[in-house]
Image (cartoon, grey):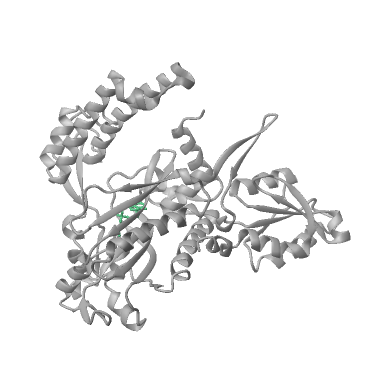
Amino acid sequence: MAKQEDVFKTIIAHAKEYGFVFQSSEIYDGLSAVYDYGQNGVELKNNIKRYWWEAMTMLHDNIVGIDSAIFMHPTIWKASGHVDAFNDPLIDNKDSKKRYRADVLIEDEIAKFEEKINKEVAKAAKRFGESFDEAMFRQTNPRVLEHQRKRDELHNRFSEAMNANDLTELKQIILDYEIADPISGTRNWTEVRQFNLMFKTEMGSTADGAMDVYLRPETAQGIFVNYLNVQKTGRMRLPFGIAQIGKAFRNEIVARQFIFRMREFEQMEMQFFVRPGEELKWFDFWRQTRLKWHKNLGLGDSKYRFHDHEKLAHYANAATDIEFEIPFGFKEVEGIHSRTNFDLSQHEKFSGKKIQYFDPELNESYVPYVIETSIGVDRMFLSVLCSCYEDQDLGNGDRRAVLHFPAPIAPVKCAVLPLVKKDGLPEKAREIQHRLRFDFTCQYDEKDSIGKRYRRQDAIGTPYCITVDHQTLEDGTVTLRERDSMDQRRLSVDELEKILSEEVSLNSLLRKLL
Ligand code: GAP
């Protein structure tokens, strides 16, 4: 079986080869943790965004969308706490001159204990075969217990240091556990310092007195500061939500794992405003609703899990992550937080404007509470890509790379292929493509053998190929080939639109949510 690391490398290479994701500024040797989406990537990304946007704004009467600016008044980031507390602890190695996140170095050390435990378990499972009782082995094997004890000891010390924001202790842990720089191999570390993740730039000319502004590190604040505008102009009554999709920027110190952690990325966030005291009911509602949205794509229910936060940010009273299994483990794709009235109250305080809701049923005014759902478009893209990729063995030494995308979000829905490049078949195929392209992203391809063309479409995840042959000219029928089963059936050109719209429309996916 291929190692997960190799699987991931293959997927990254495939994403580049087939026009999904490119390293930004590649001809200048690239820009770290910044990526561009290619011709197929942008279609997949847009479809993911449409699935989210329409599920939010069309399936909920009480959710509307906005598109706020990336630049905002700098005081917003003071009010939200980002200027003072949106930090990562960083440490430099004096020999390699490389910069690391101190918490990530320690987390990697914790993961090493976990790997040792997993190796013991895998070895024993091989030795004992079917009679192996994994739970019993984990509870009783002395080597496993020793690794577990050491792991827990380190984990507890680390958690305490992080909770207390104790940078000296973080450095001490790195020294005590003899954590070395993976590049220089030395333990010649600087002190641990806090590093603010926001990108700063200047607005206006210096003659006018330029103002420091930030590239937003989340889209959420654009929603909070527009709460009153939307509530009043939309005559919204609680509970109601505001959704937004847009770019966010973070100067991540450790940028790795492809598009999982980027410096410029995209978020889909929704703030749901509720009556105080009702927030935990709504938190539970959104926890379930969001999981259903994910599972509805059919990528495999066992790939999802919740990770409820034990330690909550000071303003939150409940928080969970939806994690998805990708080749390097279960990772956060979406966060759902009950943020109390923290953000709106802060903006009330810093702006001096009253941000309240008059509740006609209670006959009183209050600052609404908020449930936030926040998902990264790029992480969602990565989850879809990883779970849909297959290097499939077709037998007799034949293989194909295929992306089993759910049809409604596939970048290309169908390809029209003339069997040969003569006898009027290209003209007929073009005619069919021109008819379909009003409703579906539809490609035309006449180059190479039909087998090679099928493989090319499999590799970009096109659910249907329509082959035009000599019989088409006689009776108006074509062959429809389905990507996953590779089954082919003959049908009339006139049936194509109906069949395709049933199978590939976003509507079909959205309907399953209700
Ligand atoms: N408004 C809340 C918020 O921004 P977050 O957990 O920091 O919360 C929400 O981010 C989501 O944004 C994450 O679950 C993740 O999917 C995505 N995200 C965060 N940082 C990212 C990064 N550097 N690269 C790609 N996606 C990121």
Asked whether 49 or 100 is in front, the reply is 49
Asked whether 305 or 46 is in front, the reply is 305
Whether residue 512 is visible = yes
Height in image: 105 above or below 309?
A: above
Q: Residue furthest front?
A: 361
Q: Quadrant of residue 5?
A: top left
Q: Residue furthest top?
A: 127
Point 47% across, 65% down: residue: 55
Point 33% across, 72% down: residue: 239
Report the side of 52 relative to 241 (left or right): right
Whether residue 116 is visible = no
Ligand 1 lies in quarter: bottom left
Height in image: 190 above or below 456?
A: above
Residue 303 place in picture, x, y as percent: 45, 44
Point 26% across, 27% down: residue: 148
Report the side of 85 relative to 327 (left or right): left
Q: Residue furthest right?
A: 474
Q: Quadrant of residue 274?
A: bottom left
Residue 428 place in picture, x, y as percent: 79, 61
Point 12% across, 45% down: residue: 164
Report the side of 316 relative to 289 (left or right): left
Asked whether 481 or 246 is in front, the reply is 481
Residue 442 place in picture, x, y as percent: 65, 60
Residue 425 place in picture, x, y as percent: 81, 57
